[in-house]
Image (cartoon, grey):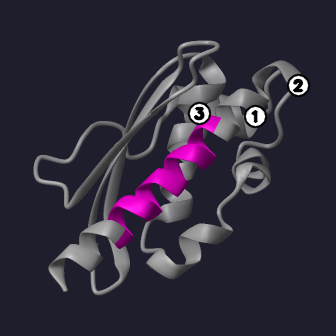
C-alpha cells in the first residue's frame, strides 16, 4: 500500500518537466529495474533557485522525484549532502521494501547534482 503523501505526489507531481536553460542537469538510472531520474536546476549564489525533474519508472519513483524537488528548492548547495534515502522516504510517508529503490534513485540523483554543481563551480573559478 502507498501512503497518502506518496499518492498525492504521484497524482499531483510538483516541479515536473525540464528547465529550458538549466545551469546543471544530471541523469541517474537504476540498472536493475530500469527507473530513470533526470534533475535540472538553476543555482544562484550557492542556492538552488529552481529545480525540475523528469522520471520514468514506477509510481514510487515518480512520487519520490516530486518530493525530492520540494526538498531541494531554495536549499543551500552545502546542505545537499544531508539529503539521503531516509529523508526522501520520509517525505513520501514511507515506502514498502519493494519500493525503497525509488528513494535510493533520488538520493543518487541528489549526489550527482551536488557533484555537478561543485564541478561547475570549480571550473568557473
Q: Residue at x 73, y 49 (%)?
A: 85
Front label number (1 vs 2): 2
The number of numbered discs placed on residues in the rendered structure image is: 3
Q: Secondary structure at mark 2?
A: helix
Q: Main secondary structure of the magenta part?
A: helix
The image quadrant where one finds the N terminus is top right
Front label number (2 vs 3): 2
The image quadrant where one finds the C terminus is bottom left
Residue under circle 1? 4
- Tell me the distance, in whole angstroms, between the alpha carbons under discs 3 and 1: 11 Å
Apparent side of residue 40 relative to residue 125 in the rendered image (left or right): right
Q: Is residue 105 above or below residue 90?
A: above
Residue under circle 3? 63
Q: Is residue 2 above or below residue 25?
A: above
Q: Residues within 10 Å of mark 1 (few under 14, many from 20)?
A: few
Q: Residue at x 42, y 74 (%)?
A: 74
- Residue 107 falls inside the magenta stretch: yes
Apparent side of residue 82 relative to residue 55 in the rendered image (left or right): right
Q: Residue at x 72, y 43 (%)?
A: 92
Marking on residue 97: 2
Front position in the image: 94 or 28 = 28
Q: Position of residue 38 (x, y in %)?
A: 38, 37
Q: Earlier in the sequence, mark 2 or mark 3?
A: 3
- Tell me the distance, in whole angstroms, between the alpha carbons under discs 1 and 2: 17 Å
Apparent side of residue 58 relative to residue 92 in the rendered image (left or right): left
Q: Secondary structure at mark 1?
A: helix
Q: Earlier in the sequence, mark 1 or mark 2?
A: 1
> Where, by quadrant of the figure, is residue 77 drawn?
bottom left
Q: Is residue 6 above or below residue 30?
A: below
Q: Position of residue 50 (x, y in %)?
A: 30, 63
Amino acid at each position: 500500500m502507498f501512503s497518502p503523501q506518496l499518492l498525492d505526489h504521484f497524482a499531483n507531481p510538483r516541479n515536473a518537466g525540464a528547465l529550458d536553460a538549466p545551469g546543471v542537469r544530471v541523469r541517474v538510472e537504476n540498472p536493475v529495474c530500469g527507473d530513470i531520474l533526470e534533475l535540472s536546476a538553476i543555482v544562484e549564489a550557492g542556492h538552488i533557485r529552481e529545480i525540475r525533474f523528469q522520471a520514468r519508472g514506477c509510481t514510487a519513483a515518480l512520487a519520490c522525484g516530486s518530493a525530492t524537488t520540494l526538498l531541494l528548492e531554495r536549499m543551500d548547495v552545502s546542505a545537499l549532502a544531508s539529503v539521503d534515502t531516509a529523508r526522501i522516504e520520509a517525505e513520501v510517508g514511507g515506502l514498502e521494501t519493494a519500493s525503497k529503490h525509488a528513494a535510493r534513485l533520488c538520493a543518487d540523483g541528489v549526489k550527482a547534482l551536488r557533484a555537478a554543481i561543485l564541478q561547475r563551480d570549480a571550473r568557473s573559478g
